[in-house]
Image (tube, grey):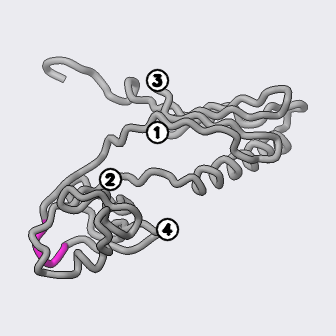
Amino acid sequence: MAIFSVYVVNKAGGLIYQLDQYAPRSETEKTFSFPLDLVLKLHDERVVVAFGQRDSIRVGHAVLSINGIDVNGKYTADGKEVLEYLGNPTNYPVSIRFGRPRLSSNEKLMLASMFHSLFAIGSQLSPELGSSGIEMLETDTFKLHCFQTLTGKTYCSLALEVAEKAGPFGPGS
């Protein structure tokens, strides 16, 4: 099990510390001709795929770079607006790299605060007296482990279940 990120939340639900050991695994670069067969839109100050999944490009993936130039929000590193650039047929063929967007600092604060609320609700709704709240939240791709100290600080870690989900290795598998 590999640790993906660690969050430390105070009693009030504020994020004190956060560490990411994030290496994007699903980045895809494709060359497109005009017209673009994906529908892109601006969402939370990012250009994301809204419709038209293909190959390993999924709905929700963000545009990370165009022709090797990084994209920051809705602008390229050289100041061009992404949607305007991709709407111009003279810019094609164009190579676009897509991937999962990193969380902004504000999104990390909101997630920590939201999890703190869920943790508190879990503690209060438990049929057991003195319940410690949510200890582990498990999905098909990751586990969220949680520990609350006596001082009220909550430590959360996201762990990827890579080895268990990978299946058998070697010849003939």
151 left or right, relative to 85: right
Q: What element carries label 1?
A: loop
Nearest the eye: 122 or 156:
156
Q: Inspect the image, locate mark 3, and give the three-letter code of the amino acid beneath it.
A: Met
Q: Residue 44 shows which numbered tag?
A: 4
Q: Mark 4 or 1, which is nearer the eye?
A: 4
Pointer 2 and pointer 1: residues touching (CB < 8 Å)?
no
Identity, as a three-letter code, of the amino acid under mark 1: Asp
Q: Quadrant of the C terminus?
A: top left
Q: Is residue 104 above or below residue 156?
A: below
Query: Closer to the camera, 28 or 77?
Result: 77
Q: Tell me where residue 26 sits by quadrant.
A: top left
Residue type indicated by callout 4: Asp
The numbered mark, 4 or 3, whose residue comes first in the sequence reads 3
Q: Mark 2 points at which residue?
A: 99
Please give the name of the residue rendered at 28% of the width and 48% of the height, measured from the top-left corner.
Answer: 27
Q: Distance between the residues labelled 2 and 1?
A: 20 Å
Per the image, the residue denoted by label 1 is 140
Relative to residue 52, is residue 159 drawn left or right?
Answer: right
Q: Mark 3 points at which residue?
A: 1
Span highlighted in magenta in the image: 32-36
Residue 123 figure quarter: top right
Q: Quadrant of residue 110?
A: bottom right
In this rendering, which labeled residue sits more in front, label 4 or label 3? Answer: 4
Sequence-wise, which precedes: disc 2 or disc 3? 3
Dot 4 or dot 1, earlier in sequence? 4
**Secondary element at image label 2:** strand
Taking the spot 13% from the left edge, 81% from the top edge, the residue there is 89
In the displayed structure, does residue 100 sit left or right of residue 35?
right
